Amino acid sequence: MRPPRSTSFSSWPIDESEILMGNGHKRILILLLAIFVSMAASRANAQAQNEPRSLPPAPQPRPNQEISTPGTSTTPAPPQPSAGTSVAQPAGNNAAEITRPAPPAPQIVTPQLSLEQTIDRIFQRENQFLQSLRNFHPLIETYVQEVRPDEELGTVPKNDHYFLARLDLQPTLDERSYLKESKGGFRNLFRLAFLEKLTNLFELHYLPLGFAQMVLLDNANFDRQHYEMKYLRREFLGDVRCMVFDVMPTKHSGKGRFLGRIWVEDQEQNIVRFNGTYAPHSRRGYYLHFDSWRLNVRPGLWMPAYIYTEESDLKYSMLQRQARMKGQTRLWGYDLKNAGRQEEFSRITVDSPATVRDQSESAQDATPVESQRAWERMAEDNVLERLEKAGLMAPEGEVDKVLSTVVNNLEITNKLSVQPEVRCRVLLSTPLESLTVGHTIVVSRGLLDVLPDEASLAMVLAHELGHIVLGHRMDTRYAFNDRMLFPDEATFQRVGFRHTSQEEQAADAKAAAFLKNSPYNDKLANAGLFLRAVAQRANELPSLIQPHLGDGLAEKGSRVLRMTELMNSAPQLQMNRVEQVAALPLGARIKMDPWDDHLELIKAKPVALLSAREKMAFEVTPFFPHLSRHGSEPLASNTIR
Ligand SMILES: [Zn+2]
């Protein structure tokens, strides 16, 4: 069982207005642009909370000069939450940061380490980290956009690439891909020599292995013989105080060595961020630049979670053609063995008989209709559980509740009573898609990220609700449990929930009717605008609009497949107008816990956009996660109510 979340539904910055319907038993919550605040908001969060805050510069130590560790620090250490002191201070305020009160007594007493000892500890910790990482098999997703300059918007996407695989660091870096083999024959590329051809962009192929590599500083030789380190200063990343070092490979230390900067948390000397590239660059091979972040997922365990890549002058052929690209890599599913609805066997024996007994109220056998429904629900539950175990679906959580609230609004205003009840879940992947598994509506994380407001979310959900109400049934072969026993990597091949184009049109018609009766009826212009934005980018972002399990919104050739009437009635799309936000950047709404995959909505205050260049519809942006130590409440939360 999962521990309760720290963030409750009611603590969101939601502007709730309630409408009492009929006999007053049922209540609709209309979340007026509630959860779905403006795109600007999310970026404000990224900027305000996550900007590295610097402490006063530490004097540059000479060799053997001592670097004080928290126990002996002369600089105030971040207060421990257990101290019970609530520090109210605006996030991102440097001045406030510096004047943080010191805790009454040091919580962790570490012996004073000299600079040389500290560096030895960093090498040692990183090698321990490498060993422990071999025991984990997280999912690794990379989404890359090639961009071209644009006069009004700075840059705009011109092509994209998507990779999803499971990471296996034993014995050498390997990825088992979830996606069907594409024409490039990625499997063969996996077997190429480690490191040397990793990010060889000679022909501008983005090898997924190259992105996986960026979770590591150095696969085997991160030590004094191969690297030099130069101490710079202390700096906070989120709530975590770090020591910052520049790292250079020593002479003749070989190819593929890390060159750049590292941030090391100052309690156990774990590297929490590294930023740079691999060196030396050769004429044929080219290593990407990257900014790689680790999160403290469990005590003492800092795991790779986010990597941002960006190149603006990638030369990739004899003709010296240039490429510009930017990409996001996310890792999650470190603790998949505990995913799904499973209990300890011992629970059954210690629990009272009542909890083990079948809960059904009637003592009668099910009627034929009830049997059919139960059979379909069983198939549905099997699929959901399988997807969760494969690391493709988030466990049940607060985001599901938001979606359910919107579905409930649609059901009540349309006087629908669907049995068994409609549920909502989130697919963890980026490509924009939604699907229906029996009576469960599933929306991808990427789609939730880019939707501009609640009305456009209602549009997506209304379409799926249309499928459910029209009885577009799922294939009940999934009710047989043997059909769920396949390798995780085969998930996309084994399960699929596509509909025929007739079913799609019928669901659209139903959805239009539902929306008309709903509280979203007068806000549908933005939903239509969102579809216009999808149409405008569909040609440049084929990988983003390509669904893997369900139905997509559009297909290549800029043809929108969903709710076209709604789109046609929307106002003109004006990408260069700052006020018109038709779609948000990726990562704008949903925050994922890389350890257990649970999702949260990003809470952020809106911020005004400076120009249309900051709209960045459907685009990838750099990561600035707010680092905190596992189990400690983030300090920034003190400022949010
Ligand atoms: Zn559909």
Image (cartoon, helix red, strand yellow):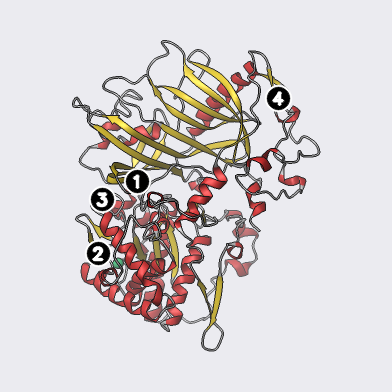
Q: x, y percentage for residue 66?
A: 69, 18
Q: x, y percentage for residue 425?
A: 44, 62
Amino acid at dot 2: Leu
- Judging depth in this view, the residue of 611 and 61 nearest the camera is 611
Is label 3 within 8 A of ligand 1 (CB to nearest ligand atom)? Answer: no
- N-term-proximal mark, 4 vs 1: 4
Read off the residue under disc 4: 68
User: Gap between marks 4 and 3, in whole Å?
Assistant: 52 Å
The quadrant of the rendered image in which ligand 1 is seen is: bottom left
- N-term-proximal mark, 1 vs 3: 1
Visible residue check, residue 551: no
Left or right for 592, reference 75: left
Classed neighbour count for the residue bearing mark 4: other residues with Cα under 10 Å, few (<14), some (14–19), many (≥20): some
User: Gap between marks 1 and 2, in whole Å?
Assistant: 28 Å
- N-term-proximal mark, 4 vs 2: 4
Amino acid at dot 3: Pro
Instruction: State if disc 3 and disc 4 touch (CB < 8 Å).
Output: no
Read off the residue under disc 3: 542
In the image, is residue 528 above or below residue 134? Answer: below
Read off the residue under disc 2: 561
Left or right for 201, reference 41: left
Left or right for 169, reference 29: left
Q: Which residue is painted at 58% across and 55% down in the image?
A: 2
Mark linked to residue 489: 1
Q: Which residue is painted at 38% across and 70% down in the image?
A: 375
Instruction: State if disc 3 and disc 1 touch (CB < 8 Å).
Output: no
